[in-house]
Image (cartoon, rainbow, N blue to C red):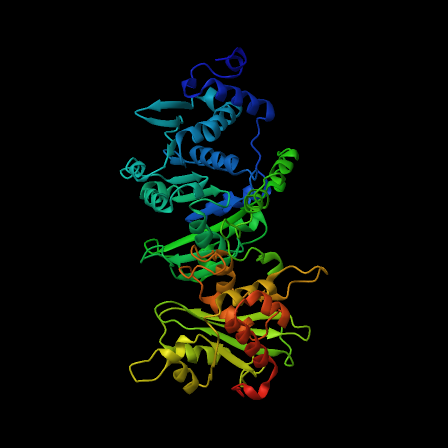
């Protein structure tokens, strides 16, 4: 141990945990943080207040957003707030724990006077933990594979904190989170069992975190309550609460009162998300942003610098950006052309999108109906009911055409009728979409998404109420066998409906269509779609 380290540290702390390089890193941290006060940034304070209200919280986004600092502060605060409070801090490997959380905890606890008060970092029985004089402890653990989960299955933790959560396999992570529980005695004293995940976008757990926390909460705008009685695979949402913007309001928030019902502790899981940003961290040297700008991969640069959860390697729609493609709803003028586009499914979700074009040819996706487990007649009834004019509920919108999945003409029900016939009987006559011309259709979607040179918004914008289209847009990936096509194993139902709908008015000129389509069949399809958009007399019009 260096002489400088001897001078700063208390002798009876077990520093055998630290290598010489880690001792040097510890000294650097001590020099970087000179104040004994442990002040959190406003966004960190909001996250900590929300963590006291929900079951699982994700604090994540850009590198340098203060994730490690918040994790340690939250663990320390809980340990001092409650007697006999047990916290587990996880990373994928022990070396990562040593370089980050353990080093920082030594420095922080020394400056707070914890070591002088008798708080000790010990490595006993293969358990590395801070032991407090009030009986609380903060254990450091790692979770790299299935075998590691066994270490935690007989334990219980009042709080579990997971650093760099997307580096851990979600299956293993959920298994350990099942150890997150407290006793009735502690609960009576104000202890609330909860877990907080800290991470950047990307990695093996990206999709798990994105679906459960980011997309479900509309990027942190709402607290979401799931019913997980049947597991975490697409659990139904039973309620949402808007997240207050003022810290004091977050601290006073009564979620059950806002929901209008008491959450069931056996079935309901309450989650929240707080986006972390490097630029919000006043302690971060600005040259760090320059380092992030230098990352060669555009995807990784957006993930680490901007905290962008909508990008990942292999993403099919690289131009999708919710900041420019998602807008708040407005009243669609009666003069704009409107269509419906339907992707059918019963066991899998079905989706109907409503699309309108303004006089300049810009498309607006202004409504969606989405769901699984509905028979065809029920789907048609839902689509018809949703087509009522919002301004005049006794009337129906004038829809120029309803294009639909061609499979709806092939499949037959038990009464010998196709799904398309059942829709027609419900007042929704359908026109074939050209499902098999997939690559040209995706090129058309990309043309609508592309940024414009004149600075105007892109040619397509989506109302914020179309939550399933927005949620699944960034998740789509390239097909491994055909990179020009989209992987059909993903949740692509809303995107298929969008492809059908935008095919009514292709963006490309006919010359571009011929160049990009590449085959006579595709050229014929493009010409057909062009005629479909221009000739009212060739459409089966729904007059309602």
Residue at point 36% right, 37% down? 144
Whether 417 is drawn above or below 485: the answer is below
Closer-to-camera residue (52/228): 228
Task: Give how far across and how far down residue 232 sits, in percent.
Answer: 36, 54
Splitting the image into 4 quarters, where does residue 514 fall? bottom right
Whether 71 is drawn above or below 504: the answer is above
Task: Give how far across and how far down residue 224 sits, in percent.
Answer: 45, 56
Q: Residue furthest right?
A: 454
Q: Residue furthest top?
A: 3
Closer-to-camera residue (82/373): 373
Q: Is residue 127 visible?
A: yes
Q: Is residue 326 visible?
A: no
Residue at point 54% right, 58% down? 317
Closer-to-camera residue (400/194): 400
Residue at point 43% right, 85% down? 424
Q: As drawn, is 424 to the left or to the right of 321?
A: left
Whether 431 is drawn above or below 186: the answer is below
């Amino acid at each position: 141990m260096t002489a400088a380290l001897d001078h700063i540290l208390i002798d009876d702390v077990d520093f055998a945990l630290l290598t010489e390089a880690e001792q040097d890193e510890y000294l650097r941290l001590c020099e970087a943080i000179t104040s004994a006060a442990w002040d959190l940034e406003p966004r960190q304070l909001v996250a900590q207040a929300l963590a006291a209200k929900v079951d699982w919280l994700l604090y994540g986004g850009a590198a340098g957003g203060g994730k490690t600092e918040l994790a340690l502060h939250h663990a320390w605060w809980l340990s001092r707030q409650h007697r006999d409070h047990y916290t587990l801090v996880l990373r994928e490997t022990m070396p990562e724990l040593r370089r980050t959380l353990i080093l920082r905890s030594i420095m922080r606890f020394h400056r707070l006077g914890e070591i002088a008060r008798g708080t000790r970092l010990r490595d006993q029985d293969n358990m590395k933990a801070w032991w407090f004089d009030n009986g609380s402890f903060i254990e450091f653990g790692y979770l790299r594979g299935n075998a590691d989960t066994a270490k935690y299955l007989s334990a219980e933790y009042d709080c579990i904190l997971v650093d760099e959560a997307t580096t851990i396999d979600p299956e293993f992570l959920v298994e350990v989170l099942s150890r997150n529980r407290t006793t009735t005695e502690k609960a009576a004293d104000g202890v609330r069992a909860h877990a907080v995940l800290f991470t950047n976008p990307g990695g093996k757990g990206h999709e798990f975190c994105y679906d459960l926390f980011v997309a479900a909460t509309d990027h942190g705008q709402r607290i979401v309550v799931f019913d997980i009685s049947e597991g975490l695979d697409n659990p139904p949402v039973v309620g949402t609460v808007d997240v207050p913007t003022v810290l004091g309001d977050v601290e006073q928030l009564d979620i059950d009162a806002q929901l209008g019902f008491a959450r069931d502790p056996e079935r309901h899981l309450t989650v929240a998300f707080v986006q972390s940003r490097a630029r919000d961290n006043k302690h971060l040297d600005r040259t760090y942003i320059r380092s992030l700008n230098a990352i060669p991969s555009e995807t990784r640069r957006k993930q680490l610098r901007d905290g962008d959860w909508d990008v990942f390697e292999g993403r099919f729609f690289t131009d999708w950006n919710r900041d420019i493609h998602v807008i708040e709803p407005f009243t669609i003028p009666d003069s704009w052309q409107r269509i419906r586009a339907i992707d059918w499914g019963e066991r899998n979700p079905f989706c109907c999108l409503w699309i309108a074009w303004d006089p300049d040819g810009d498309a607006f996706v202004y409504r969606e109906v989405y769901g699984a487990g509905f028979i065809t007649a029920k789907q048609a009834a839902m689509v018809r009911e949703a087509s009522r004019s919002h301004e005049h509920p006794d009337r129906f919108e004038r829809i120029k055409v309803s294009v639909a999945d061609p499979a709806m003409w092939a499949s037959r029900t038990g009464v010998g009728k196709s799904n398309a016939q059942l829709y027609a009987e419900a007042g929704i006559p359908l026109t074939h979409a050209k499902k098999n011309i997939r690559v040209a259709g995706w090129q058309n979607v990309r043309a609508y998404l592309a940024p414009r040179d004149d600075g105007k918004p892109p040619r397509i914008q989506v109302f914020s109420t179309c939550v399933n289209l927005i949620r699944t847009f960034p998740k789509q990936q390239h097909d491994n066998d055909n990179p020009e096509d989209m992987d059909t194993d993903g949740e692509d139902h809303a995107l298929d409906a969008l492809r059908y709908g935008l095919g009514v008015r292709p963006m490309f000129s006919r010359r571009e269509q011929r160049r990009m389509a590449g085959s006579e069949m595709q050229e014929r399809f493009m010409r057909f779609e062009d005629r479909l958009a221009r000739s009212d007399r060739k459409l089966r019009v729904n007059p309602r």
